[in-house]
Amino acid sequence: MYTYYISVGSNIGDKRGYINSAFQLLQEHETVSEVISSSLIETEPWGYTDQDSFINGIWSCKSTLAPLQMLGLLQSLEQLAGRERLIHWGPRTLDLDIIMALDEDKTMISVCNKRLTIPHPYFWDRIFVLEPLSELLPTFTYKGTTIGERLAYLSLL
């Protein structure tokens, strides 16, 4: 059993509708349990900035799916929302990224292959990920720094 932390974003059309529909489908999936959502926040785009603002949040869930299987499930939810991959970091109806995964012992796992990198390589640099993550994991520490300290640092940049 794994615990997944999933970054959620949308900036096209019915942003909250896409997120809510995917959340419901994830809750109903037979291999997934204990699905929790952070608050959703509106944020400016990161990377490619010539696009509409995003609605972002973090979901946590438990699942028997291995990381690549979970990636497949999340990508199927993106496809159901009409996700198109036209511009790197570009506009999207739904973006679901595994940012972190824990094993049964609550130890962070590491995956690095052509399809998936866990932890997500940019999660520690993105306020729109860390702010909602801090709601679900307020005492989280990564590489010797608390999530609160990291958010304070990033807010100064």
Image (tube, rainbow, N blue to C red):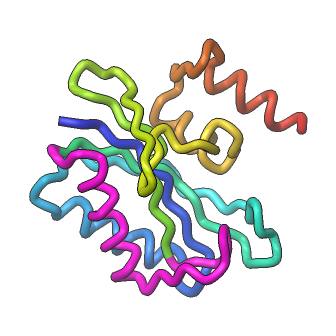
Asked if residue 30 is positioned above or below residue 52 in the image, the reply reads above
Decide if residue 154 is on the left or right side of residue 28. Answer: right
Identify the magenta region. Answer: 64-93
Q: Nearer the viewer, residue 78 or 147?
A: 78
Say if 57 sits above or below 19 in the image: above
Q: Quadrant of residue 112?
A: top left
Residue 44 in sight from this viewpoint: no
Q: Is residue 82 above or below residue 88?
A: below
Q: Is residue 81 magenta?
A: yes
**Quadrant of the rendering where the C terminus is positioned:** top right
Judge from the rendering whether residue 123 lies leftward or rightward of residue 101; answer left or right.
right
Screen quadrant of the N terminus: top left
Instruction: Pinpoint residue 16: horizontal percent, then vertical percent.
Output: 50, 73
Q: Quadrant of residue 71?
A: bottom left
Residue with the most extreme right position: 157
**Res 109 seen here:** yes
In the image as oriented, which residue stretches furthest toward the left? Answer: 30
Picture coordinates of residue 138 (x, y %)?
53, 26
Task: Say left or right for 64 vs 22.
Answer: left
Magenta segment: does it hold 114? Answer: no
Q: Would residue 67 appear left or right of 123 to someone viewing this image?
A: left
- Residue at (41%, 43%) from the top-left corner? 5
For image coordinates 53% across by 54% down, the residue present is 57
Residue at left 22%, top 45%? 66
Q: Which residue is painted at 22% across and 59% down in the image?
A: 27
Across and down, in percent, residue 32 comes to 18, 52
The one nearer the camera, 114 or 129, is 114
- Name the residue nearer the viewer: 122 or 29: 122
Classify residue 53 by image quadrant. Answer: bottom right
